[in-house]
Image (cartoon, rainbow, N blue to C red):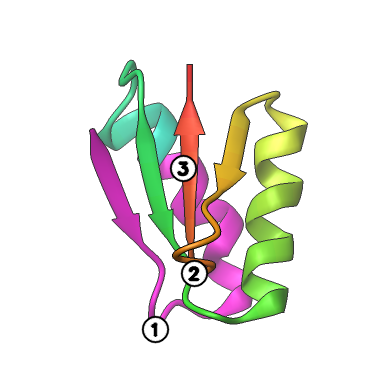
Amino acid sequence: MSTLDLHGVKHAEVEDKLTRYFFWDKPGHKQYTIITGNSKRMQELVFEWLDRYEYKYFVSSHNLGEIKIVD
């Protein structure tokens, strides 16, 4: 499993960070975790990006600041 922590990342940089991470830095993993913290806007940006590229994901009820991507 591979983890991307977006704490401290500006909203304007989220799309670039996700694209670089998924397609250049860590391509081909079966599972990813994205740490967004509790920022609703950060989560919305990540959800939009994941939906655009048709990733399947969920948010666990025990940690709402973490998004799990599954194969």
Q: Earlier in the sequence, mark 3 or mark 1?
A: 1
Image point 76% across, 48% down: which residue? 48
**Residue 70, position in %: x, y?**
48, 25
Mark 1 element type = loop
Q: Is residue 59 above or below residue 45?
A: above
Kindly identify the amino acid type of the residue bearing the numbered disc 2: Gly
Q: CA separation, marks 3 and 1?
A: 19 Å
Q: Nearer the viewer, mark 1 or mark 2?
A: 2
Residue 47 is inside the magenta segment: no
Q: How many marks?
A: 3
Residue at mark 2 = 65
- In the image, 23: left or right of 4? right
Mark 3 — residue?
A: 68
**First in sequence: mark 1 or mark 2?**
1
State whether residue 47 is above or below residue 9.
Answer: above
In the picture of the structure, the residue carrying the numbered disc 1 is: 8
- Magenta region, residue range: 1-20
Magenta highlight on residue 4: yes
**Which residue shows up at 41% across the image and 68% down it?**
6
